[in-house]
Amino acid sequence: MYRLINDRSIAVASTLAIGVASVVVVLIMLFLGKESLPAISEIGLGRLFSDSSWNPESQGDEGLFYIVPMLAGTLAVSTLALAIALPLGLLTAVYTEFYAPRGFRFIMERAVELLAGIPSVVLGMWGLLILVPKIQQIDGHGASVLAGALVLGIMIIPTIALSSRSAIQSVAEKHRMQTTALGLGRSCSVLDVFIPLSRKSIGVGIILAGARAIGETMVVVMVCGNMSVFPQSVFDPVRTLTATIALEMGYSYGAHRGSLFLIGLLLMLSVLTALLLSKLIPGSSLRGEDTI
Amino acid sequence: MSIKTFLFTFVVTLCCLLPSQEANAADKRLSLSGSSTIAPLISEIARRFEAEHKDFRIDVQTGGSSRGIADARRGLSDIGMSSRALHDEEKAGVKTHILAMDGIAFVVHAKNPIKNLSAAQARQIYTGQISNWKQLGGEDAEMTIIDRAKGRSEQELMTKFLGIKSPEVKANLTCGENQQCLKLVTGNAHAITYLSVGTSEYEVNRGTPIRLLDFEGIPASVATVKDQSFPLVRPLVLITPERLPEEVEEFLNYSLSNKVDDLIKGQAFVSTH
Amino acid sequence: MDRYVFREGSFTVITWLSGIAVFAIFALLVFDVFYHSGLFSLEFLFSDVKGAGREGGILPVIISTSLIVLTCSVVSLPIALGSAYFLFYFSRQNTRISALLRVSLDVLASTPSIVFGLFGSAFFCLYLDLGFSILSGGLTLACMILPAVIRMCEEGLSATPEEYGLQAAALGMSKTALFFHVLLPAALPTLSAAVLLGIGRALSETAALLFTSGYVLRMPESLMDSGRSLSIHIYDLAMNIPGGDQNAYRTAAVLLGMLFVINSVALASMNFCAGRVIRK
């Protein structure tokens, strides 16, 4: 048995493993591209940005494939969700690390972990049954950018909190003694030392949270109203790109189905671009070894 | 326990879960796809059928009425489910069998004083010409007009009944599944949407605060769908290829028989018997 | 002096408020689920579905979900471990290749879940002809959780003391022996936490499974059967089945319970084993 498992074979096996892991990404883009071909050949990329509306199955004409309002919807909901989740997530991380009394700290850590694991359908249900009627009483029709952003924000708070916390933790371990020696109080050491030192890792956590917000499907289908229009206020309903895929994938054929795969491909490419751009910022890593 | 022993037992356990060839060979497998309105009913029928015929395995997937029709026409599923009648161009090469009857009703919150909707009013609401309840004699409140997702049979039927084209529809919100629409209405006293008569009546009987509006003076209910006085009726159909394999025919005949009438009634659809 | 005190005080207040706010949101959500689910016995977990799910229990769904998660773990764990091994041992030499590998993993981590659903449907269901099946769902989920599990495995391996490598070299142990007999047991707490957290992530997934493992409510007999996961069952009950709300909430309560147990076990393993092994 031991002759089989030697350094050589393990090296080969592990190379195979990493090969498979990295090939998955390529495979995904390949298959998305392959399934988008009917759309690219029949519709062409330009019409996605120039048609008059999104109406792929309209009888009579060959269908309309305008995706820009849905793109705006995706961006509106995700940006607002990040704006809500960033301060709350970051401050929760700071709270759990530096301010929470020991017993409550344990409870907070479990709470954040569990919040991270709550399925999106459960959050969507809560949003639909409780949040949407309340928003309708304030303004608009209930299902809106605001509803989506609030529920999405709640979803990504734990993502930001957990990644920020591990970043700040490792920095704090190194520099706690120095800040104490200098007589800096908690707020000063956190705001002026720890957070700036770990800002690159926190930034990566924010990007991952943003990617999660952009990629979320079930919540936005349930609470955003699914109207393919440009939102003009937070109380307007929107439709996101992911919602369109989820709603129409089941029954679409041919060019329509291809256009949904094309949207998926575009989503992946934009995530890829965002990540590559973030790598261009020198020194960014996931493990918090940063200098000011 | 060393890692080797652990791995060995693990792999053996896993092998027990792999498909057993003999079981599959004896199985008569059917696959159905289509309307999510019919899917729960067919699942229940399939369950009862499987209990009586132990060698059958019937898989039900959703995907919408259009998917059901397309899958049946392409032979991708044995039976397609559709909650609307087929268009002429869809009928080639397939047979339709009516499982039950249902209707489409306009639904509002129970607190809404409006009781009746004329065809003209419905048309004006869904083309954006009426947007306030006071224009219909109700409160002075902005309507929340809820359309159904494109591709759903209800959406196609509504545009057909009211004689409007899909791009002409102007609404405030779009909802997908039936219950999502219902929840949007129960949470909003000024909302209006359109839903299956059966589903809506089931909900009213459960105490959900909604009301089905009369259409052109005729009340929307399972009873009026049954006696065909209600204008907005639609068939729930099963679609098969013209020549059926034996096992498909067996299940089909069972579903269309009166043995499942109680299940149909249980979902508040109208049986054809 | 005054400005400093003001800053210290207001920051403390804001931080406390944020902590309490997030905890309140969490408590609100959990309370909402358990309030609407009402009291139900364990029988719910072990009895069959009735009335398309609105009555009865969720046993077939639990079995399907377990099989999906099992497939997912069994497929992703060796790949993740092997990848972590590679990144741990070889990443220091070829920085460009390793950077490329890590970027591809990051992209995978950020891919929307519905895109995994599209990919799974096109690749596993159609191209590999697995159809709507637990296997398709499990493989799709394995792709999804791979980057997260790899990252945690890598961290687990890196957290082992550097001396182990030197001591092994001094003793003349091969790299393989070092890995299987020293590093793996030492990193076991983090590794098991990685697997468990991956499982937790897989349990909550809906969009990726909609088009891969399907909708069927029956007790699955093999991995090739279609079967629905707990989150899809919740979605169907809440959005499509009249009268399905209460069982939707009950299923959600069950799912939250399972996640709580998984998280606790992961935490316990990290704390318990860590203490024992490193002291050895």
Image (cartoon, coloured by chain):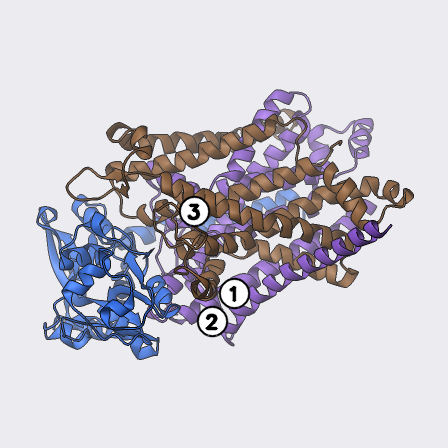
- Chain A painted colour: brown
Report the disc number at residue C208. Answer: 3
Disc 1 crowd, CA 10 A, few/some/many (<14, 14-19, 20+): many
Report the disc number at residue C44. Answer: 2
Judge by depth and name the residue closer to the eye, C245 or B174: B174
Residue shown at the point (47%, 33%) measured from the top left? A270
Question: Which quadrant of the structure image shows residue A32?
Answer: top left
B148 to the left or right of A78: left
Chain ID, blue in image: B
Report the disc number at residue C254. Answer: 1
Disc 2 crowd, CA 10 A, few/some/many (<14, 14-19, 20+): some
A281 to the left or right of B113: right
Chain of the residue under the numbered disc 1 shown in the image: C
Q: Are marks 1 and 2 in contact (CB under 8 Å)?
A: yes
Check disc 3 and give the amino acid type.
Answer: Ala
Q: Are marks 1 and 2 on the same chain?
A: yes
